[in-house]
Image (spheres, grey):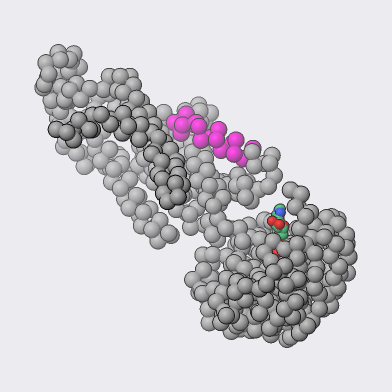
Amino acid sequence: MILFEKVGKTYPDGTVALKKVDLKIEQGEFIAIIGLSGAGKSTLIRLINKMHPVTDGKLTVNGTVVDDSLVGKDLRKFRRGIGMIFQSFNLIGRTSVLKNVLAARVADIPFFKALLGLYSKEDKIASLNALEQLGILEKAYNRADKLSGGQMQRVALARTIAQDPKIILADEPVASLDPITATQVMRDFEKINKELNITILANMHHVDMALKFATRVIGINDGEIVYDGPASAVDNALLKKVYGRELTDDDIMDN
Amino acid sequence: MEKLKDYVKNIGKYIKGIFIPEQIIIQDGIVVSPPRSVAPYVVIAFVFVSYFAIQATEFSIFEVIYKLFGIDILNNHFEGPWRAMTGWEYLSRYFFPIDYGYWREVISPLVDTIQMSFLGSFIGSAIALPVAFLASSNINKNKFTLTSARAVLTIFRTIPMIIYAVIFVWVFGKNVLPGTMAIGLFTFSIVAKMLFEKIETIDLGSYEAIESTGASKGKSIVTAVLPQILPSFYSMSLYAFEINVRYAAILGYVGAGGIGLILQSNMADLDLTNRVFTMLFFIWIVVISIETISRFLRRRLA
Ligand SMILES: Nc1ncnc2c1ncn2[C@@H]1O[C@H](COP(=O)(O)OP(=O)(O)O)[C@@H](O)[C@H]1O
Ligand SMILES: [Mg+2]
């Protein structure tokens, strides 16, 4: 369970990105976070794995309080259970797809093995299984930077699966993909969510994608939660509240 | 004729246009001012510097012609030639014939030179790799170690390789060890510099991704950053090796081992003999071969 209690975030430069956020997320939910660019979506998900530290209130993730005392080994162990997906895929260039997936398990091996890229047989089997689950096993020995965008995001998903997380945080996972590929990648998220009961929190710029796949939608406007409820209850009046204006073509991917 | 007059009249305007680009007025009277270019100032500075450089070195093409061929084109009455023959006679007499049989004596110090260069390049590059990460501002967020690493690199880079060789010969005596160390230090300082500049340009997205899985900073670097820069690193090390083979030939001159040692004994008092040119010939063969191989490997790495 992820619990936000009056959580706020002020960046060192004084920017207030989040104000008094209250949220309760159960294991296995599929949540889309929607809102304008700059609303605070990326900030919200980065607080969860402490890529950015919380500055106000209390955040608890699966029993761990994510505060200033969570550092070093404890922080790394905590992050081990949280996967992360990025808009720009963030694969390691000049290396194979398999090595990219194996990298998710580097946290558990000694440094010298990491330096020499020596992974155990179990690690290799787990990584290849993850690739198989996403239907790109045949690309295992191809170079990751030679794939298409959709394939890259799938490799990133396989990497996250190989990490065996309880939660996946996705920051605009399909924003750089075309509508058809985006739908396919969202289906992969859906499958992972259902089959592995992994909690998914995805920032979505495109409203239609968010409503189609998520079961719960959180709308953010200027650092504040303005909607939190089922995707089925989202209507135009509500979207106007989240976006502060009528929707434009830009806010919808498949049009 | 009218046109020429126009040009003369406007010459001031043209000159001004070189330094201050003319404003362009587009529709609605909107004025667009192009940015000033530094190019004309660079050209002026270059002309000035060249002028003083020529003055300082008393470089005169006519003097060179006179000393090489003994022809005084403008009747300048140059002094010399400083030997009884012209430069050209001197070079052509002693350059050839190349004494191929001399290779028996050359081969061992030449191999020493290559070994020195190889080992020095290898050790220097190996040390450069971790230090380059310390010196990269996008990886190392600790101001103290960052500044120290950069300061060390700047200091090492400022000292010419030959000075290292002199110092190490003084400490360790005349053999290949000081040469290897001098080459190692030089390689370290240039490879680390080139490498940290490369590291600073790479995309850290994958690094962030691996760190988010709970991997330590060190493991994230070797997993996500290292594969991206390794090809450049190998390429830089090979390039350093290429340079080093050439430098290494000179190092022997101060006693740091290798071919330079016999080059020096043969060149005492600037007495050029065909043995010297024979040696140069063999060095040239080695340098060309290594450059060819290195270039081939570097192209494969790109
Ligand atoms: N590292 C940072 N330092 C300072 N301000 C930041 C930083 N990251 C984001 N912000 C600011 O915080 C606000 C929320 O940003 P972000 O969470 O990236 O929004 P979104 O992901 O919804 O586009 C914006 O005003 C942004 O400029
Ligand atoms: Mg964002």
Q: Position of residue B68 (x, y in %)?
A: 16, 25
Residue B28 visible in the shown view: yes
Work out which quarter of the rendered image holds the C terminus of chain B and state it.
Answer: bottom left
Residues B284 and A139: in front is A139
Residues B111 and A194: in front is A194
Which quadrant of the figure has residue B34?
top left
Residue at image location 69% in from the left, 66% down from the top? A36
Look at the image and say whether residue B164 sits in the magenta stretch: yes
Look at the image and say whether residue B179 sits in the magenta stretch: no
Residues B301 and B112: in front is B301
Magenta segment, prevailing SS (helix, strand or loop):
helix
Give the vertical position of B253 relative to B130 (above or below). above
- Judge from the rendering whether residue B283 lies leftward or rightward of residue B190; answer left or right: left
Magenta stretch bounds = B148-165
Work out which quarter of the rendered image holds the N terminus of chain B and state it.
Answer: top left
- Judge from the rendering whether residue B128 lies leftward or rightward of residue B108; answer left or right: right
Q: Position of residue A115 (x, y in %)?
A: 62, 60
Q: Position of residue B168 (x, y in %)?
A: 51, 31
Residue at image location 55% in from the left, 33% down from the top? B155
Give the vertical position of A22 relative to A154 (above or below). above
Residue at image location 84% in from the left, 65% down from the top? A21
Residue A31 visible in the shown view: no
Give the vertical position of B187 relative to B268 (above or below). below
Q: Position of residue B49 (x, y in %)?
A: 36, 26
The single residue placed furthest to the front in the displayed view is: B28
